[in-house]
Amino acid sequence: MKILTVVGARPQFIKAAVVSRILKGKAEEVLVHTGQHYDHNMSDIFFEELNIPKPRYNLGISGGSHGQMTGRMLEAIEEVLIKEKPDKLLVYGDTNSTLAAALAAVKLHIPVYHVEGGNRLGTLDNPEEVNRICTDHVAIRLMACTSSALGFLEKEGLAERASLVGDPMFDAFVYYGTAVTETHKNALTDFDGNAVKRPEKFYYLTCHRQENTDTDEKLAEILKAMDSLDAPTVYPVHPRNRTAVERVCKQFDFKNIIVVQPVGYLTSISLVNGAEKIVTDSGGLQREAFFAEKQCVTVFDHVIWPETMVDNRNQLASPDANDILQKLSAAQKINPDYKPFGDGHSGEKIVEILLS
Ligand code: UD1
Ligand code: UDP
């Protein structure tokens, strides 16, 4: 069996690492990288650290408007599909790469297998929601990470195509977590490439969503909250908002925020495990905070991972310094028996469905 996998963005490399490792030797996998993320620290570093096979194709498509990026990918992926003639297409998550690949395949009657199906925010204003809904509805098999995601698929009439498999990000956290070394812990660099020392006590921030970075005011509020905390914040900055972060940090002269280049997965996990608390707008990082039992505040208007939103373990905040600080100060409660993201073996279940 020939399976063609399309990835393009940072979180997809991590999920693909989990599944490709298990798929190896059981089917031929053709890996296609759209090029959506392309900086070394946004792409190659994940392939190197997680031993992901080199993609057979890199389409080199990134940037532009959502329509431009998706349209260019659709055309280029169609060409690859026609050439490779795979039996199945495998896609992850909700990026423009996911949507473009799903559309290209379904129009060629190639069955689409979607990992991380079913998550819903309830608003089409969010670009990833549009990608998720369209991909789910053209996919032949939907693999949900959580029971809430499965519930959304059932409500949309997709129950017969859907299975609950658990979260490959949890698999990655368990499997690759053991590979974190002191080198990964000390791999922080500033924008000029100089090594940056990680403080003993720190908070971990990531913030890159379109919704939080479209104006300096929102970013300034988030950074103001972090700057006022009792320990420095380590903030690896996504290239999307690097210029804005530099501008806002200069304007407000923040002294308690350590701004660094994006880090590799193992360094990110080491930051998760070492942090006091986590503030983020990332879907992946809020789950990793949960896996590591670190309290998280998600700066976003919508719940994307409802299972994490219990006992103050993950709370939504608006991009408002007071709101973020208030949420950070609430005590969390941990129930060690509560494991809503599966058993760390979703990769095996995904492969079983792919091969069936
Ligand atoms: C995308 C996903 C988002 C996911 C995120 C993961 C969509 C619609 N959104 O958002 O769901 O959370 O990836 O990180 O697909 N850029 C660089 N270098 C890079 C990558 C990006 O400079 O290596 C720049 C691009 O040129 C672009 C901007 O960052 O101008 C945003 O990148 P893009 O891939 O469009 O969206 P993300 O914010 O990364
Ligand atoms: N991450 C990383 N380096 C960073 C920031 C995040 O490796 O500099 C990891 C993070 O630990 C998580 C994943 O990237 O595993 C989340 O990706 P991202 O926030 O880009 O996308 P999202 O999850 O929001 O789709």
Image (tube, rainbow, N blue to C red):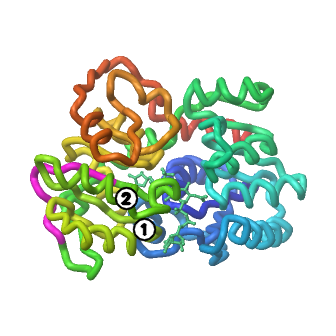
The magenta span reads 196-205
Task: Determine crowd level at label 1: few under 14, some 14-19, many 20+ residues with C-alpha closer than 10 A.
Answer: some
**Vertical placement of residue 61 versus 278, above or below:** below
* Residue at figure coordinates x 35%, y 35% from the top left: 291
Q: Is residue 270 left or right of residue 16?
A: left
Is residue 197 rendered magenta in the image?
yes
Q: Is residue 3 left or right of residue 42?
A: right
Q: Quadrant of the C terminus?
A: top right
User: Can residue 283 be seen at all in this image of the molecule?
Assistant: yes
Q: What residue did someone put label 2 on? A: 219
* Residue at figure coordinates x 77%, y 73% from the top left: 76
Q: Amino acid at mark 1?
A: Asn
* Disc on res. 298: none
* Residue at figure coordinates x 80%, y 56% from the top left: 103
Report x, y in % for residue 17: 51, 54
Q: Is residue 85 left or right of residue 31?
A: right
Report x, y in % for residue 158: 78, 30
Q: What residue did someone put label 1 on? A: 241
Where residue 218 sits, quadrant-wise, is bottom left
Report x, y in % for residue 245: 34, 68
Disc 2 and disc 1 in contact, CB within 8 angstroms = yes
Q: Could you tell which of marks 2 and 1 lies nearer the N-terminus?
A: 2
Label 1 CB-ligand 1 distance < 8 A:
no
Where residue 120 sits, quadrant-wise, is top right
Q: Nearer the viewer, residue 308 or 345?
A: 308
Q: Residue furthest bottom?
A: 192
Q: Amino acid at mark 2?
A: Leu
Which tag is nearer the camera, tag 2 or tag 1? 2
Is residue 42 rendered magenta in the image?
no
Q: CA distance from mark 2 to mark 1?
A: 9 Å
